[in-house]
Amino acid sequence: MTNGGAPATEPLLDVQDLQVEFRTRDGVAKAVNGVSYTVAAGRTLAVLGESGSGKSVTAQAVMGILDSPPGFVTGGRILFQGRDLLTLGKEERRRVRGAKMAMIFQDALSALNPVLSVGAQLGEMFRVHTGASRKDARDKAVALMERVGIPAARARVGDYPHQFSGGMRQRIMIAMALALEPDLIIADEPTTALDVTVQAQVMDLLAELRREYRMGLILITHDLGVVADVADTIAVMYAGRVVETAPVDQLYKAPAHPYTRGLLESVPRLGHKGQQLHAIKGLPPSLTAIPPGCAFHPRCPLARDVCRTDRPPLNDVGPGRASACHFWKETLDGAR
Amino acid sequence: MAPGEPLLEVRDLVKHFPLTRGVLIKKQVGAVKAVDGVSFALRQGETLGIVGESGCGKSTVARMLVGLERPTAGHIRYRGEDITRLSGRAMKAVRRNIQMVFQDPYTSLNPRMTVGDIIGEPYEIHPEVAPKGDRRRRVQELLDVVGLNPEFVNRYPHQFSGGQRQRIGIARGLALRPEIIVADEPVSALDVSVQAQVVNLLARLQDDFGLSYVFIAHDLSVVRHLSDRVAVMYLGKIVETGTDEQIYDHPTHPYTQALLSAVPVPDPDARAHRERILLSGDVPSPADPPSGCRFRTRCWKAQELCARVEPPLAVPAAFHDDAGPARHASACHFAEERHVVPSE
């Protein structure tokens, strides 16, 4: 997914037709059903979707932290810097994780160890991956804390996670992800639990660091506003599939999938007091019973017979754009 | 109640939670000043939006309005009568008219009760509203009103999605035909596509039943969508209040301006030419709020005066002769109008 007319370079991450299922007592939940997306070095891909769309599960499969069992990757490839991660052994995979790619989670309080000081947790990265001494590791931890904007870092390096505010904890999570200067960062709803003024601080920090270290960033979110603020390209997910990908400005101006259009129309705007919101009717499907054909058809205003039987492929609909809708032309025209 | 008089009037409302030390001999060592002097009025059929970040006291205000917390000081007048000191039967009669919808549709419904029992439970407490034989029919009517299948009365909460559960919570809030609904973050836990459905439902119910809402949320876009008037809270106090247009398009308090400018807007074009006000630091502890203006520790305009004198919530002197929408109550010594929301 190159941005507009930019020259095509080899992507940093290339996920191809990924499939993940969860085998539970109640049946098989098909969480990811053929997801493909790419991230270029130094760019930001936003993965937008509602709960149960498979956006986090895809990221967990990329990171190699899927709970297995019950989760299993049943197909597809995850090419990272040209190597298929799914073919690597456990030990090799572990070396990639943390050093080459890192993850930032939504809830810093539960992602950090409550009984270890933040300095010890940050320092552990250096001790395990680079064999640094205790003292070196601590100094590096302090430097990192300063870099992510924690005031009085040297005095607070021995503090425990609960002694920091939510925004500061999220900064520590970012520091941890950044420790070994990875090439790819996956941030899963990094600011959802934060207040708006703090959210703005944290998103700014993340964007600044991405530029500085020329990292690729996958930002997983449900917030259309956050996406518009920071992303270069977007992948919209629904029921375990990418239904539309596009450069960010084009997607907001002229969505090529009815689900994307529905999402854009259903958010209230800050700039004016609206009338009735155009809500998408119905509910997202259960992953154990995904509708046949196009998974969105029961909620789609454009649905016709073909949508109930044939699963639409991810069609090319323009430079750097794709849409998994039989009627993408009509949708695009309707938007213009 | 005389015509034009507010349905609900809140005056100098205070709630302090004591901080104690010691196990056997408890000694009060301070207090968390969750709400510290809040006043507002709610008129018939209108929606008052209360916005603010976590810890600003907005949920505590909600809990006091419905009688779940007893205020430390101040008055809540419902149709002219102070309800903070009522007890027993009188309180029960008032509560019937002020009902609450909670944020979390997963924990606010009893998992061991059927939907019919949950929505019908208010009738057990207020049997005069619906005679026994009539209750099932009423519950089914309510399910229909909130857009759920009336056949679902015997199902349990876990058989519903988050959005459907929130509809159940709303149906329960409507059961006693209240005049006022206090909704505390009613759509925050819902997905975008489902959130719009519930927002539309709340708007329709207001028209159909002539309800008045106190709508509490941290999502400023949702609040604007539903509210006629808006109050912005910071650290236990209202810092600015006015109509939705006054607050969103003509804010004069620095905190409101920072809050509005920080909201991510779903429009990539706004990214380039939008002015962001980034606040430094975190909200101070409500157990030990700053002297004078509580926002001064994060404010770029703060001067010595702000630490000494607390600015009152009133139309600032600078706007006394202003006839435009910038003339509204704002608790700042240096109030200035500033446009921070991109117009569409």
Image (cartoon, coloured by chain):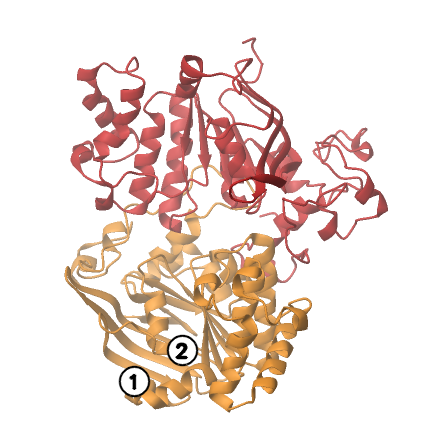
Q: Amino acid at mark 1?
A: Leu
Looking at the image, the residue that sits furthest to the right is B304
Query: Is A173 on the left-hand or right-hand side of A138?
Result: left
Expressed as whole percent of the image width and height from the top left, the position of residue A77 reads: 29, 82
Q: Helix or strand or loop: what does disc 2 sit on?
A: strand
Expressed as whole percent of the image width and height from the top left, the position of residue A310 reads: 18, 64
Is residue A176 shown to the viewer in this render? Answer: yes
Classed neighbour count for the residue bearing mark 1: other residues with Cα under 10 Å, few (<14), some (14–19), many (≥20): some
Residue drawn at point x = 61 percent, y = 61 percent: A201
Quarter of the figure that contains the N terminus of chain B: top right
Q: Which residue is mark 1?
A: A86
Is A168 or A178 nearer to us in this picture? A168
Mark 2 to mark 1 CA distance (whole Å): 16 Å
Residue drawn at point x = 38 percent, y = 61 percent: A256
Residue B166 placement: quadrant: top left
Q: Chain of mark 2?
A: A
Q: Chain of mark 1?
A: A
Q: Is residue B81 above or below residue A77?
A: above
Query: Is A253 on the left-hand or right-hand side of B17?
Result: left
Residue drawn at point x = 58 percent, y = 38 percent: B18
Q: Is residue B8 above or below residue A48?
A: above
Query: Is B285 on the left-hand or right-hand side of B42?
Result: right
Q: Helix or strand or loop: what does disc 1 sit on?
A: helix
Expressed as whole percent of the image width and height from the top left, the position of residue B165 reads: 30, 41
In the picture, one chain is orange; tell me its letter. A
Q: Is residue A6 above or below residue B332?
A: below
Is residue B32 shown to the viewer in this render? Answer: no
Number of on-image labels? 2
Give the colour chain B carries in the figure.
red
Q: Which residue is mark 2?
A: A38
Residue drawn at point x = 58 percent, y = 81 percent: A213
